Amino acid sequence: MPSIAMTGSDSITINNRVFSSLATGTCLELTYPNDIASVKTGKDGNSIYGLNETGKQCEVKIHVIRGSQDDKFLNNLLTQQNANFAGFPLMIGQFIKKIGDGQANITSDTYIMSGGVFTKIPEARTNVEGEAEQSIAVYTLKFSNAPRVLT
């Protein structure tokens, strides 16, 4: 029997706020930019393995409608971080991807994020040909830990 994956109704939450003003296309990207382990092989095939704790870090790019309530919420947090970095409370979040199997069973593919900060300021542009991307704000965040849980 083939495996089926029906996805939809994904959700993103940052600091307990559920986002609803997500942009078109790819509205969230969650990546792990660092390896979780390293391997060095030397003479006679002797190998050394090392755990890389930075492999637990995740980068999140969230695309929201520019000027929306979600944009204002994130911009307010960014302003707080820039005003008092040492006093900024680290962000928490969840990304939940719902996966159906075609038989009414649903698995939640959940990333539980903690220790978050903004790493970039959203960029802007204008386009006289009506490009939709000019109406999207992209926020880049990094979380120190983001384990994946399937339930």
Image (cartoon, rainbow, N blue to C red):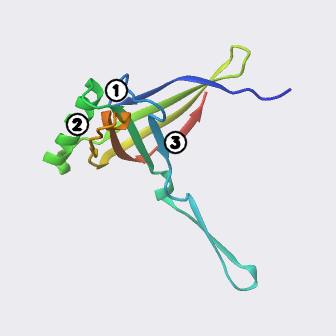
Q: Amino acid at mark 2?
A: Asn
- Number of labelled discs? 3
Residue at image mark 2: 75
Q: Is residue 138 above or below residue 10?
A: below
Q: Quadrant of residue 19?
A: top left
Pointer 3 or 1: first along the chain: 1
Q: Tell me what residue is drawn at x 45 percent, y 36 percent.
A: 28
Residue at image mark 1: 16
- Mark 2 or mark 3, whichever is nearer to me: 2
Pointer 2 or 3: first along the chain: 2
> For numbered disc 3, what is the local secondary structure?
loop
Q: Is residue 37 above or below residue 103?
A: below
Image quarter (top left, top right, bottom left or bottom right) of the C terminus: top right
> For numbered disc 2, what is the local secondary structure?
helix
| Label 3 with label 1: CB-CB less than 8 Å | no
Residue at image mark 3: 147
Describe residue 47's horizontal placement relative to residue 75 as left or right: right
**Outermost residue toward the bottom in this view:** 43
Describe residue 10's horizontal placement relative to residue 22 as left or right: right
Out of 60 and 15, give the one closest to the viewer.
60
| Label 2 with label 1: CB-CB less than 8 Å | no
How far from the left and from the top, in percent, is residue 129? 33, 37
Task: Kindly report the distance in space between the C-alpha atoms of the residues bearing marks 2 and 1.
Answer: 16 Å
Q: Is residue 99 above or below residue 81?
A: above
Q: Amino acid at mark 1?
A: Asn
> For numbered disc 1, what is the local secondary structure?
loop
Q: Amino acid at mark 3?
A: Pro
How far from the left and from the top, in percent, is residue 85? 19, 50
Q: Tell me what residue is drawn at x 28 percent, y 32 percent.
A: 66
